[in-house]
Image (cartoon, rainbow, N blue to C red):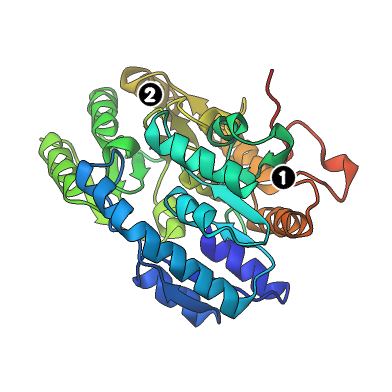
Amino acid sequence: MMLSVLEAARGAGWEALVGMPGDGPLFRRIEQIGFETTRLRCGPFSVGTKSISDAIRFAVQLPRLVAQIRTLARRFGPDLLYINGPRLLPAAAVARLPIPALFHAHNYLPPGMSRRIAGYSIRELNAAVIGCCRFVAEPWTAFVPAERVTVIFNGVSGPGIATNRPNSASPRIGCIGRISPEKGQIEFLRAAALIHQGLPHSRFAIYGAPMFSPSAKEYANRVRAAVRNLPVEFPGWVDPGTAFSDLDLLLVPSAGNEGTTRVVLEAFAAGVPVVAFPGGGIPEVIEDGTGFLAANAEAMAERAIALLRGDRAVLNAVSRAARESWRRQFTLQRFQEKILRAIENAANGAPISARSNPAEASANSAAPPITTP
């Protein structure tokens, strides 16, 4: 999503200095599209629950990170500080830059010390907040006024045309994403075993790879061990279009702290039906007719068997409805337009949820303000 924001900013003629806690492929890609990049002295930290050593490392690095942010701001002279991850919020708050700040929340931060530190930092910054869904955004209303928090759903590009897949005697069912517990590949295999009993000719694919930590590799080993005699492939990371062109159905067994995962929107764009767990922000994007929610692996398998064994016209109708939902709400262009407007509003001190067209205030518009009782 960072690349999508920067590409939109480039199209608007904006300048940006991008600081990142690393210098991997994303760092180099941002340089290639023409933005100045710098490596921030932050991390590395464990994914998920932080250890005592993480806390010590964070405390040791904080003064240097504050000084670096101040130096970069003096040199670049920004109109807005756009913060794309919670671990940088404390340093930004301590730096006390005399410019507006905007925090873009992509993931749910569970209750605890990390959320409190991030929340107090947002309050100190008087930052506006964008959440990728209500589930992700609402916790921050405990720290800043609700009118300073808004939701902008992610947007994805899609194929030029979606075609109905032929009735296949060997349906192919996939799971796409980073191989980690929160993405639920073990649950996918539980569902796959039940589907294979009902549809012996079905085939399965787990796209993705472990990332970020040794624990992710341990989980990936558990996933491979759980395959047993199932016909499961591990293609690794591939272009989403390539993956979806081979799939009849996508299963999304994500854990309950998931936001509105991009893979659901990419499936919508490709016209591939989705069966997902109803955790986190996923129910916010799957409406009646565009996909299906299943409470557990057993219910997911039952739904998949019914769909793949039933009238193909039902799958095709879901495919069309999902693609129409993407076209109305989740295109990359729509996301970029709303993000640019929110950034501009934040930089000018205007309400973060301000709209240029009142007709956009529909229930599923991608920038509703957050309200609380």
* Residue 97 screen position, x and y as percent: 60, 62
Query: 186 left or right of 167?
Result: left
Marker count (numbered): 2
Q: Residue furthest right?
A: 358
Kind of residue at disc 2: Met
Kind of residue at disc 1: Arg
363 and 339: which is toward the camera: 339
Q: Residue at x 41, y 64 (%)?
A: 65
First in sequence: mark 2 vs mark 1: 2
251 and 335: which is toward the camera: 335
Residue pointed to by mark 2: 300
* Residue 42 screen position, x and y as percent: 35, 61
Pick the quarter of the image with the C terminus. top right
* Residue 261 screen position, x and y as percent: 48, 42
Q: Is residue 165 visible?
A: no
In the image, residue 112 sits, relative to residue 359, either above or below, namely above
Q: Give the quarter of the image for residue 124.
A: top right
171 and 215: which is toward the camera: 215
| Label 2, label 1: how far apart the Cα atoms are | 27 Å
Q: Are marks 2 and 1 in contact (CB under 8 Å)?
A: no
Q: Is residue 332 visible?
A: yes
- How many other residues sit within 10 Å of disc 2, few (<14), some (14-19) or many (≥20)? many
Residue pointed to by mark 1: 328
46 and 184: which is toward the camera: 46
Q: Residue at x 82, y 42 (%)?
A: 360
**SS class of the residue under badge 1?**
helix
- How many other residues sit within 10 Å of disc 1, few (<14), some (14-19) or many (≥20)? few
